[in-house]
Image: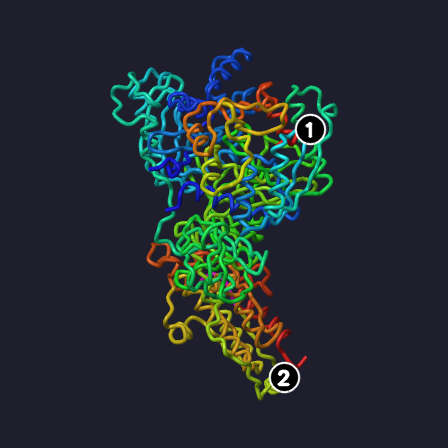
Amino acid sequence: MASQLDRLESRSIYIFREAFNSIDKLAMLWSLGKDSNVMMWLAKKAFFGHVPFPVAHVDTGKKFPEMYAFRDEYVKEWDLNLVLRDCPPVEEMDPSLPPAARSAARKTAGLKGLLAEQGYTGLIAGIRRDEEGTRAKERVFSPRGTDAEWDVRNQPPELWDQYNTAVPPGAHLRIHPLLHWTEIDIWRYIEREGVPVVDLYFAKDGKRYRSLGDQDITSPVKSEAADIAAIIAELEATREPERAGRAMDHEAEDAFERLRADGYM
Amino acid sequence: MSSQNRERLPVVIVGHVDHGKSTLVGRLFHDTGSLPDGRLEAIQEMCTRRGMPFEWAFLTDALQGERDQGVTIDTSHVWFKTDKRDYVLIDAPGHKEFLRNMVTGAAQADAALLLIDAAEGVREQSRRHGYLLHLLGISQVIVVINKIDRVGHDRERIAEIETDYTRYLSELGVIPRFVIPISARDGDNVVERSRHTPWYGGPTIVEALDHFEPAAAPPDLPLRLPVQDVYKFDDRRIIAGRIEAGILRPGDEVLFSPSNKTARVKTLEAWNASSPIEATAGDSVGITLDEQLFVERGDVISHIERAPIESDVFRARLFWLPREPMEVGNRYTMKLHTTEVPVTVQSIDKVIDATSLDSGGGTVVQQNAVAEVVLRADRLLALDSYITCPMTGGFVLVHAYRIIGGGNLSMEGYPDQRAMVSVKSTNITAVDHAVSGEERAQRTGHRGGVIWFTGLSGAGKSTIAQATARALFQRGYQVYVLDGDNVRGGLNANLGFSPEDRAENIRRVGEAAALFADAGVLVITAFISPYRADRDRARAAAERLLGEDAFQEIHIEADLATCEARDPKGLYKRARSGEIRDFTGVSAPYEAPDKPDLVIDTGGNAVDQCVDEVLAYVDSHYSARK
């Protein structure tokens, strides 16, 4: 009998193949985190060892050195067509945003630059519903307006595995192949498949990173989990939310929603 | 069972706005200890800041707009677990304006909790949501009567609502697993048994959830693998798709529909894993074949036996979401498994009021209504009736980049056209005739052709056919009438009146008529021939042998009431009494011609006048002495 992981995997593969078939200018966002890497792995499963679209890293320049080293290694290992895009300085961001959200907004701006430059009509992103309240309301194929905005009050219906795959002129679609996965699913899949991840996730000196972002707005959590099995055991017991260490989620009630409505992942 | 293999069951919570769906989700979370640390405090703080009483709903109402207005706008997913299994709880909005989001949430669920406010009782969306669950194929339902504190935990009031609502559900064929009285706000009968309902002996919400079963594809369904894509990334040519039903193994001989090609499966492909020895429903697979076939997205792979239906016309029961109404003649894009095809609304047969279950006719389907319609696709599709195979019998309609409706297919009254398009003999070579059509026309003074009458029983097809034949004969035409009397007794004696047999009946008449015409005869056919696809094939048969203009489609038209009043053979009376089943116009469809070559109105005109019109038309088209 197929396991729960098999079911999750099969559905993600289905989503990848729908996106690849229906969208002409398709790219995948690679943030170098655990979810991104699982997503890459699923793409290789969907396309039998190939990743048949560009992989974009929107680089804030403030990631951990371990993440850049990981990127350079796996671009070769996985034979990826990597597209790099940097982000404008924080001074150019909306000053009404709280500090961490303002810093994170650089990534939205970089993303918009990437879209303008490359003309992508579909971007695959590794968000999950269990991460955060507005992501819990996302669609698998989620339309973005001509300025990448998310019209959250007017999302289209999405039924069974029939998606809104047509792209209006000037707009683009976000495709979310991991939307139905949970954090613990990700780690169980990493364990089963041997998906490589950055070492920062594993505890050193009583701390580990549970979620990875920019160095200055991401903090580690207390943990003794030094390998995958220990992380899974920790997650089975914890009541601490995954993004507790991501400052931009917690500064104001609506900060993250505002980021996302403007085009953030 | 290892935790990795725990079942995960998606359950949707639906019901009228403000009946307490989001509150129940919050309560379930809190009382099962599933809330992340700090969440409760954060919600409390938020409520204080907003100067309002504590609301559990803030747990899933993550959008500012939702909190500001105290109403759920979009559906949300949250995870929690019991000792038995993991759950994905899908909170769906109850406001009428957000029905599209309710449907989006419910379509992902295997089971549902239907919430009703004990004080307000059954309301409009309580009923509509019940109906939509039924249409979405969710049969596992628990009815939850919430806010029992508001009616003083009154047993009689609760029983009243239970009777009212279960009667409605039973008309849909839905029998709720349990009816549970709760107070989500106070936590009564959610996780802990309530001390206010000593008379209630059933399970709490959490206990009841564990009685649901994950929806699984019935194991005895035939193989259905819709082609999603064909990849040629390396030296392999891989056909990719997800198995929606059945089992596939390397070595299987498979059929592609509607292209009707066959091949043998060589391998099941996989990356970073050994080649699977079989694949079953739910598996995303890639296969290679033993020969190179041209295969496209939208083809359905099956075994040779138990293949899907092929048709370009079908009934649909659907829900309609946009503000703009659906009207007859409108065109949309239909997505069915991996096929995408333009469809036309051919007829709207029933518009159902989901709140009263009253159904009436109608020419338009308004927003949020449910209707039974007939759709015609621009080409032949491979499909299944929803009741036979839900995975290849459910569809959505798309317009202006958005999904705007969805529903289920039924073939009731319509034939499988597979037999009509299958060519079983392959080693055929064309014969050169020693006598040409021109030579025949020179001798008879007219070309051969097929004059195809179509119309309801009693419209006057046979009467006009015979009178026209007599008049043409007198003008020197070689003419012959084909009708039920001379084909049903012999050529088609082995056919009955099922949709498939009717279609085959017309196929043979069409082929026979084409041969008569090729022999130089002018043939008049007098059959109801209710299906457009069948008549199109008869036209193709004649044009294949004789070229363009060989076939004239004449609609012998009189409305149903007129035909029924005439009822020359007493057939309508027998059909109305139920003695004859599948009677065209009464209990089986009649598809009027889209663009007939000629329309003869027998309702308003005398027979002589009708015959004169046909005569003039035929003479101008087929006479060789111009």
| Position in image of residue B474 (x %, y %) | 55, 81
Residue located 57% across and 24% down the image: A246
Question: Which of the 4 image quadrants contains residue B296?
Answer: bottom right
> Is residue B458 something that shows in the picture?
no
| In the rendered image, the vertical position of residue A250 relative to residue A148, given as above or below | above
Mark 1 vs mark 2: give the one in front. Answer: 1
Give the number of the disc on residue B423: none
Q: Nearer the viewer, residue B222 or B353?
A: B222
Q: Nearer the viewer, residue B484 or B569?
A: B484
Amino acid type of the residue that numbered disc 2 sits on in the rendered structure:
Glu
Subunit under mark 2: B
| In the rendered image, the vertical position of residue B22 relative to residue B335, given as above or below | above
Gap in angstroms between the C-alphas marked 1 and 2: 80 Å
| Position in image of residue A126 (x %, y %) | 56, 37
Numbered label tally? 2
Tell me the element at label 1. helix
Looking at this rendering, what residue extends furthest in the front direction? A205
| Position in image of residue B139 (x %, y %) | 37, 40
Q: Which residue is mark 2?
A: B438
Q: Is residue B300 left or right of residue B327?
A: left
Q: Which residues are magenta?
A: B453-458
B231 in magenta: no
Question: Which of the 4 image quadrants contains residue A32?
Answer: top right
| In the rendered image, the vertical position of residue A224 relative to residue A46, given as above or below | above
Q: Is residue B48 left or right of residue B247?
A: right
Q: Which residue is mark 1?
A: A106
Quarter of the rendering occupied by the C terminus of chain A? top right
Amino acid type of the residue that numbered disc 1 sits on in the rendered structure:
Arg
Please rate how many residues cluster around mark 1, counting C-alpha atoms within 10 Å: few if below 14, some from 14 to 19, many from 20. Answer: many
Residue located 25% across and 21% down the image: B199
Please rate how many residues cluster around mark 2, counting C-alpha atoms within 10 Å: few if below 14, some from 14 to 19, many from 20. Answer: some
Tell me the element at label 2. helix
